[in-house]
Amino acid sequence: MSRARVTVRLTVNGRAYVREVEPRYLLADFLRHELGLTGTHIGCEHGVCGACTVLIDGKTGRSCLQFAAALDGASITTVEGIAGEGPLHPVQEAFHEAHALQCGYCTPGFLMTTIEFLAANPDPTRDQIRQALTNNMCRCTGYLNIIEAVEDAARRLRAQEGGA
Amino acid sequence: MKPAAFAYHRPASLEEALSLLAVHGAEARVLSGGQSLVPLMNMRILSPAVLIDINRCRELAYIRREGGMIACGALARQGEAEASGLVAATLPLLASALPHVGVRASRNFGTLCGSLAHADPLAELPSVAAALEARFVIASARGRREVGAEAFFVSALTNCIEPDEMLAEVRFPVAAAGARTAFLEVANRGHGFAVAGVAATLEVDAAGRCAGVRLAAMGAGDTTVRLAAAEALIEDEGLSAAAIAAAGEAARAAVEPTADVHASAEYRAGLIGVLVGRALRAMAAAGPR
Ligand SMILES: Cc1cc2nc3c(=O)[nH]c(=O)nc-3n(C[C@@H](O)[C@H](O)[C@H](O)COP(=O)(O)OP(=O)(O)OC[C@H]3O[C@@H](n4cnc5c(N)ncnc54)[C@H](O)[C@@H]3O)c2cc1C
Ligand code: FES
Ligand code: FES
């Protein structure tokens, strides 16, 4: 069985990286172990919990279900990249204000899922929010504060759009 | 890093993918969206020695109309089909089933062909393909062949593709003018696999009579199941309340579901009967779309 390494070029949060990895290296492990970006959390490693969700070329994907080598050339955004060097991203701010996290393990995945969702649905109903978040697991909050945070985040983003 | 080591190939064309399959087929897996394959590799239920990643075969990334058919290449993503105006206009059954297939994050990468090839008896798309009488275009370095759903789905997680072949395209007939469709499923949660479901199409003639009905069930056994007895009842007796009730009963009696932690076999069979009734009533009540 081949242990040969392959070259992978990824842009992560705007920075270009080149690494040699085994083809079986998952994107989640690449981010955490190769790049030290430990904001992407790993729960189930089979796609179900949502904790490892990142943006891959602008779309949410489970980083536990992608081989880093297969993404050669792609652009990845992790939770570390959503606000850049600036203050919190509006969705982060809303989660903070609504007390939408306790241990915070699930939070990066919720943030990435919410960012994609609100970009497509700027003014969602509560049911649409529940549906969009149905495959992100949180073992602490009971979800209600998360749903309120997403409603608040939608308001913040609309205000920002309107003001811009 | 959970999967076992494998040799990784990333062909740039279908031709290259097929020559790799000709050499490595017996010990290889095709990687498309990875949304079913990678979980199985992470759990080491599967440890293929060779992975043939078709994601750079850009020529397979299409959803296009070819005469009376909509052709979807092996790299047509579920999310792209969901957002496609062409699919919405020509394949209403597929369009209404897609939101039930996993979640946004899985549909962003999962392909139509990958879901069909995976052949999960609880997956939505195999039943859609069966109800629409889709054609499966299977390619190898030896040539191409085309089969229907009844030949493609062999048993749970098993399709008819030979080791050196892959599914290059799935072709769905464009819905007839005035065709009505229904996709219904019942799930324990808002995400993930359902307990059972029904994909249905109905064609109605100028006088409003049933001119053809097709029903396929998921969660009904080892593969998607066409509900032929229920179809025959409706085609013979029309869409009266009595005929619909009899069709639901015929569907219940025809399926042989398996039991698991989510539902008993009996519950699944009963549910399929109920969903057939609901689908037929909804289509009977709907105007032409
Ligand atoms: C969180 C989550 C929820 C999900 N929920 C559902 C659900 O509700 N319903 C549902 O149906 N599915 C569900 N799935 C699985 C679905 O998302 C997968 O997309 C689909 O089953 C496989 O498509 P893929 O392109 O990802 O294929 P892959 O995972 O890449 O491949 C799947 C299998 O098919 C083979 N294969 C892939 N493409 C080809 C080809 N062109 N020719 C021959 N063989 C091929 C592979 O070798 C592998 O054996 C879920 C997945 C996740 C992660
Ligand atoms: S760790 Fe990837 S979805 Fe749970
Ligand atoms: S805050 Fe602890 S898992 Fe969600």
Image (tube, coloured by chain):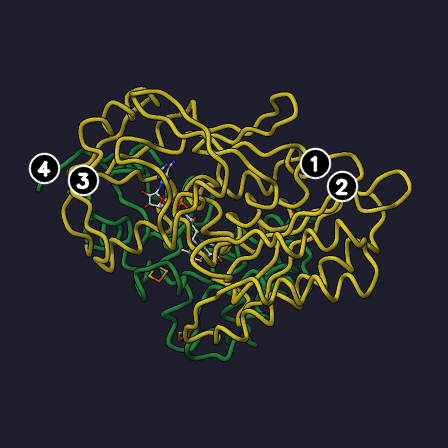
* Chain identifier matching the green colour in the rendered picture: A
Horizontal and vertical percent position of residue A140: 43, 79
Horizontal and vertical percent position of residue B188: 53, 72
Q: Marks 1 and 3: CB-CB under 8 Å?
A: no
Q: In this figure, which residue is indicated by the disc labeled 1?
A: B175
Q: Mark 4 or mark 3: which is in front?
A: 3
Pointer 4 local density, CA inside 10 Å: few below 14, some 14–19, many at least 20: few
Q: In this figure, which residue is indicated by the disc labeled 4?
A: A4
Indicate which disc residue B130 carries.
none
| Nearest the eye: A10 or B126 | B126
Quadrant for the N terminus of chain B in the image: bottom left
Q: Does residue A152 appear in the picture of this structure?
A: no
Q: Mark 3 or mark 1, which is nearer the start of the sequence?
A: 3
Q: Given the image, on which type of amino acid does mark 3 rest?
A: Glu
Dot 3: what SS? helix
Q: In this figure, which residue is indicated by the disc labeled 2?
A: B179
Q: Give the spatial CA distance, label 2 vs label 4.
A: 54 Å
Q: Marks 1 and 2: CB-CB under 8 Å?
A: yes
Horizontal and vertical percent position of residue A70: 28, 38
Pointer 3 local density, CA inside 10 Å: few below 14, some 14–19, many at least 20: some
Q: Give the spatial CA distance, label 1 vs label 3.
A: 39 Å
Q: Marks 4 and 1: CB-CB under 8 Å?
A: no
**Are labels 2 and 3 assigned to the same chain?**
yes
Q: Mark 4 or mark 1: which is in front?
A: 1
**Are labels 1 and 3 assigned to the same chain?**
yes
Q: Given the image, on which type of amino acid does mark 4 rest?
A: Ala
| Nearest the eye: A117 or B172 | B172
Shade of chain B as shown in the rendered figure: yellow
Q: In this figure, which residue is indicated by the disc labeled 3?
A: B27
**Are labels 1 and 2 assigned to the same chain?**
yes
Q: Marks 2 and 3: CB-CB under 8 Å?
A: no
